[in-house]
Amino acid sequence: MKITAVEPFIVHLPVTGSSISDSTHNITHWGVVGTRIVTDGGLIGYGFTGTHAHLASDRLITSCISGCYAPLLLGEDANDRTRLWTKLARSPALQWVGRSGITQLALAAVDVALWDLAAKQAQAPLWKYLGGARTERLEAYNTDIGWLSYDLPTMLDLTRKAVEEDGFTRIKIKVGHADPAVDIARLEAVRRQVGPDVRVAVDGNGKWDLPTCKRFCARASELDLFWFEEPTWYDDVGGHAQLARSTNIPVALGEQLYTIDAFRSFIEAGAVHYVQSDVTRLGGITEYVQVADLAHAHRLPVAPHAGEMSQVHVHLSYWHPASTILEYIPWIKDHFEEPIEVREGVYSLPQQPGASTTLLADSMAYFGKSLA
Ligand SMILES: [Mg+2]
């Protein structure tokens, strides 16, 4: 399965409503930025990372794929994933400027495309190719009902619909107002509405400093929160470790961590309880599996962050033994040949060969952006 062409793409797909916000970001589209990898037998793999649809920085990623990685891939056997991962990630010139950021996001896209190819060649969905499903029931949690930009009546209405009509038993609410008392009031209203049985997680997106996090946790301790995600600055190992020791609310993080080394630092410091690895920010599936194994060795649950809106993580979560629950945000699913699907709060098991990353040609044409 020789690689004959590497064809990067940028696709910007609209979010729910006209825009959404959390404590740190305000976006109108999700960026699906990646590459098709074409092989001599005719099979084509699709891989991508997730961005905030900022065209200038998206073009840095596709430029890295076409200018730096494609020359290292052309003519190679697409099945040599481990060797190719090392060839790209440890290329001296790229290692010098990379190891995180743009080069890692580009590597993620390439690596996912290679795994998609391997599973397609085996004519199996990725979870089956990896070794089969560990469970018949992968629960979803709904993030799309709890954006910080939603006023309270809107959030309560969406929450009611998600729980009562769509069958979700797990939801996530964004927090991070300048005064955490505002967030506490919103969460108390949510808890009153959903009752004690629905699992409610919160996500701060790294906004607050450590003292503010501690004040929030002290007041939130009666709300039975499932986890507090990205409480403070993404790279602050010591701060998260302090918080984890001081509250009964579990800490979740990982969506901003680029390497297995970063995860090791947080895990060894006791700074994380739910490991939120993401194939689109780590170096693809290859490094994701290493992080999931690391978490498993520490008996920590993995709950991926959905930078690819769970198209790939649904496979990994059905398969990997450290997996628990999986985020659900329905922004981009309808643009794939095999969209993710959640029924009564449970993910459907993908059936088509590959990693569920094959974009619809019509979507690529209509929402695609020029690479230059
Ligand atoms: Mg998050």
Image (tube, rainbow, N blue to C red):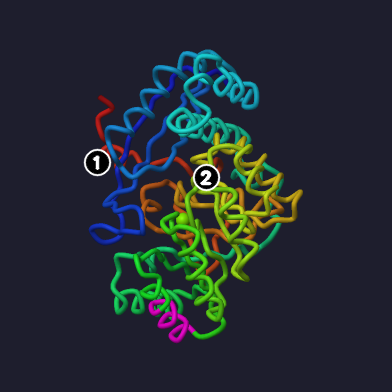
Residue indicated by mark 1: 366
* Label 1 neighbour load within 10 Å: few <14, some 14-19, many 20+: few
Drawn side of residue 279 relative to residue 8, left or right: right
Q: Magenta region: which residues? A: 185-194
Residue sitting nearer the eye, 308 or 199: 199
Mark 2 secondary-structure assignment: loop
* Label 2 neighbour load within 10 Å: few <14, some 14-19, many 20+: some
**Residue appearing at x 45%, y 54% in the figure:** 206
Q: Give the image quarter of residue 122.
A: top right
Image coordinates of residue 83 in percent, x first then y, are 64, 21
Residue type at mark 1: give it: Tyr
Whole-number angstrom distance, CA of label 1 to CA of label 2: 37 Å
Above-or-below relation of 131 to 99: below
Taking the image as drawn, is residue 129 in sight?
Answer: no
Residue sitting nearer the eye, 216 or 36: 216
Residue 192 is inside the magenta segment = yes
Give the position of the N terminus as an image quadrant.
Answer: top right
Residue 241 is inside the magenta segment = no
Above-or-below relation of 157 to 296: below
Residue indicated by mark 2: 235
Drawn side of residue 109 relative to residue 90, left or right: left
Image coordinates of residue 116 in percent, x first then y, are 54, 36
